[in-house]
Image (cartoon, rainbow, N blue to C red):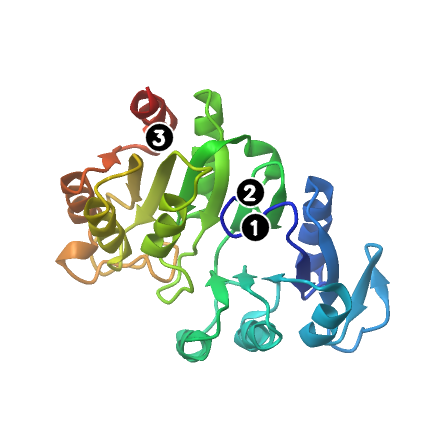
């Protein structure tokens, strides 16, 4: 069983009929994802891309049995969309939206406690289980089936790593883009934990960036677990000046442990195979797997 999603997952799209929702839902269907319907308030009863449209997530779940939601809703309404999906009993919510106010995400995180719903994102590329199911905005053709898991704060570096792993003669079990905001639903450590317990994943690529303590937390967890699966790690932002935000809202050096150098040092000390350039991820993984 792959982590989070597989060919049996039933996907609904929130913000289904909008420009982004339409474009990416089309790509997901073309990939072979079992997309069962979508939600756009006020447009219930129509069809879109040959799939039913509902006014609420609850209606969609009752009618289609959807268990995974992907959110393409503007930032000011996205937090509500996450909570609506949670309330309707969706087990996995993937939020693509960038620019959700931090205060909204604090409310969402509190709301999610004890619900049994897992949130991926926001501000992320989503999740893909190679050749089975794509819930996100990543280019599907890059992901070849295999036994390497990817967890990444960066979207584009996820695709880069997947491509390199494939070219090294290996492939991907599942790739999880956890998102680049300061407050996200699933941390690096939590994603690594899922991979450590997945019998279809033999090794992991962990891609982090400056800011926050998630990579250090994950590295210490990996060490505590006795390094039972090899991990190749990369940290983006090695040349970033302190105190300046670099692209992602969460990518800002606040304390001494937030720098790329500090994170790389902690990761190395915890037995992770750290590469200095993203160009070496595939090559290093191939060496480690030998």
Q: How many marks?
A: 3
Marks 3,2: beta carbons within 8 A: no
Residue marked by disc 3:
281
Q: Residue at x 75, y 64 (%)?
A: 64
Rendered image quadrant of residue 275: top left
Which numbered tag is attached to residue 5? 1
Please provide percent x and percent y for residue 49: 81, 54
The C terminus, quarter of image: top left
Q: Are marks 1 and 3 in contact (CB under 8 Å)?
A: no
- The image shows residue 225 at horizontal and vertical percentages of 24, 46
Circle 3 Cα neighbour tier, 10 Å, few/some/many (<14 / 14–19 / ≥20): many
Q: CA distance from mark 1 to mark 3?
A: 25 Å
Which of discs 3 and 2 lies nearer the camera? The answer is 2
The residue positioned 56% from the left and 78% from the top of the image is: 80
Q: Residue at x 35, y 51 (%)?
A: 193
Q: Secondary structure at mark 1?
A: loop
Q: Where residue 41 sits in the image (x, y, percent)?
A: 73, 76
Q: Residue at x 30, y 32 (%)?
A: 277
Residue 197 in sight in this render:
yes
Tell me the distance, in whole angstroms, between the alpha carbons under discs 3 and 2: 20 Å
Q: Is the residue under label 1 in contact with that under label 2 (CB below 8 Å)?
A: yes
| Mark in front: 1 vs 3 | 1
Crowding at mark 2 (Cα within 10 Å: few <14, some 14-19, many 20+): many
The image shows residue 109, relative to residue 171, as above or below, that is: below
- Mark 3 element type: helix
Q: Is residue 240 left or right of residue 147?
A: left
Mark carried by residue 129: 2
Instruction: For mark 2, give the secondary structure.
Output: strand
The reply, left or right, for residue 68 in relation to residue 39 is left
């Amino acid at each position: 069983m792959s982590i989070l999603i597989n060919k049996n997952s039933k996907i609904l799209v929130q913000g289904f009929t909008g420009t982004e929702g339409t474009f990416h839902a089309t790509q997901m269907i073309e990939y072979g994802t079992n997309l069962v319907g979508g939600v756009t308030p006020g447009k219930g009863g129509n069809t879109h891309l040959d799939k039913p449209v509902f006014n609420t997530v609850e209606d969609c779940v009752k009618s289609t049995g959807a268990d995974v939601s992907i959110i393409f809703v503007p930032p000011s309404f996205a937090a509500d969309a996450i909570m609506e999906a949670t309330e309707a009993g969706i087990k996995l919510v993937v939020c693509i939206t960038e620019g959700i106010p931090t205060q909204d995400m604090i409310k969402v995180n509190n709301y999610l406690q004890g619900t049994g719903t897992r949130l991926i994102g926001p501000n992320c590329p989503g999740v893909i289980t190679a050749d089975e199911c794509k819930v996100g905005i990543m280019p599907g053709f890059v992901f070849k089936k295999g036994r390497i898991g990817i967890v990444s704060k960066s979207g584009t570096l996820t695709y880069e790593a997947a491509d390199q792993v494939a070219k090294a003669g290996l492939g991907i079990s599942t790739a999880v883009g956890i998102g680049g905001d300061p407050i996200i639903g699933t941390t690096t450590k939590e994603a690594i934990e899922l991979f450590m317990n997945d019998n279809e994943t033999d090794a992991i690529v962990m891609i982090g960036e400056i800011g926050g303590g998630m990579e250090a937390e994950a590295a210490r967890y990996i060490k505590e677990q006795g390094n039972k699966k090899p991990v190749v790690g990369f940290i983006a932002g090695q040349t970033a000046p302190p105190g300046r935000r670099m692209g992602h809202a969460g990518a800002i050096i606040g304390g001494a442990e937030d720098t790329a150098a500090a994170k790389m040092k902690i990761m190395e000390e915890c037995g992770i195979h750290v590469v200095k350039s993203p160009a070496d991820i595939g090559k290093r993984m191939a060496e480690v797997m030998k």
